[in-house]
Image: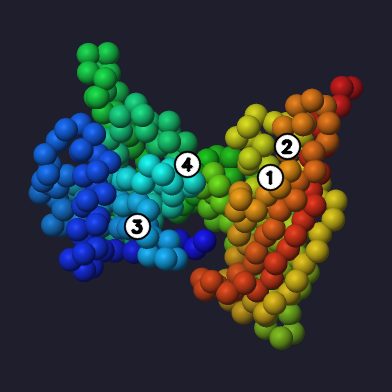
Amino acid sequence: MEYQIVAPKTEQEFADYYDLRYQVLRKPFERPRGSEKDEYDIVAEHRMLIDDEKNLLGIGRLHFNSRDEAQVRFMVVKPKVQGEGHGVRLLHALEVLARESGAKRVIIRSRDATLGFYLKCGYEIHQEGNTVDNPMAEHLLVKKLDPVNHIVYRPQWCVELEATWHEKIPISEAMGIRVHQYTGREFELRAPLPRNINVHNTMFAGSIYTLATLTGWGLISLQMRERGIEGAVVLAEGTIQYQQPVRSHPRGLVHLHDMQGDMSVVTQGKNARIQLTTRIYDGENHAVAAEFTGQYVILAPRDS
């Protein structure tokens, strides 16, 4: 399944956009129709997350409070698809928009129910809401934007993973491999083509293989941290099918639903075998340039 972030344009798209806002953010609290809108809507940027069948999955809004400060509001993911990384996709798109428009920081007001999500996305509490007297009180969160904090979800984990690779696997740094994004369910690496080019001005096959291997490795490593599992990840076996040349902006992408195996056995002192499929894309298009199937092993820690 492929997803897109788009701006609503037609009357029907805006109707669906505001209806989702109302259904999730206002109707449960018995608020009237119309309360889902405010005076900033006319000057704000609106975004919708849709799947490849044009189904609306989530929405979000960005407006500016000042030249340097942008605010995210009315961010909603349909309840039936929550927990699939869609909130991170929306927030990333809104942060990119804020950064491109010159914002130095983004603020969000969050209730307790969503506070944990935003903290994982790099936001910090600037002012706590008085939830003792009012359980619905909102906390004021702030995230400073800079050139290196484009990773939305678990940014510190991704920075640490990248640093470990560059230290332990020097070729990853020579190739310029960088973590582009992690949503909790999806992981993406990117690498500059000029560092990995062959005589045909396309990506070297060995670089494609390395990018694919580390993309799968990265998702497994981050999922281990999500689940509190310790162990070393190694590649036991890998097969790759090269389908077309990579001519620009190589991307390695892997989804959690493509991962098979039970890593929890590591907590019992057993090694875990994990299989997953990674795809390499050429630039921003949706055509698969290579498909890699990796058999990884998580080595359980041994008592010394």
Where is the C terminus found, in terms of image quarters?
top right
**What's the mark number on residue 56?**
3
Q: Is residue 192 visible?
A: no
At x 77%, y 31%, the residue is 265
Please tell me which residue lies in front, 211 or 77.
77
Could you say where residue 188 lies in the image, as x and y percent from the top left?
58, 56
Q: Amino acid at mark 2?
A: Met
The CA distance from mark 4 to mark 1 is 18 Å
Check contact, mark 2 vs mark 1: CB within 8 A: yes
Residue indicated by mark 1 = 220
Work out whether mark 3 precedes mark 2 in sequence or the reverse, and give the earlier one.
Answer: 3
Q: Is residue 107 left or right of residue 215?
A: left
At x 65%, y 64%, the residue is 279
The CA distance from mark 2 to mark 1 is 9 Å
Q: Is residue 48 visible?
A: yes
The CA distance from mark 4 to mark 3 is 16 Å
How busy is the neighbourhood of tag 4: few (under 14 within 10 Å), some, or many (20 plus)? few
Q: Which image quarter: residue 35?
A: top left
Q: Which image quarter: residue 159?
A: top right
**What's the mark number on residue 263?**
2
Check contact, mark 2 vs mark 4: CB within 8 A: no
Could you say where residue 187 lies in the image, as x and y percent from the top left?
58, 52
Q: Amino acid at mark 1?
A: Ile
Residue indicated by mark 4 = 83
| Residue farthest along the bottom direction in this orientation | 200
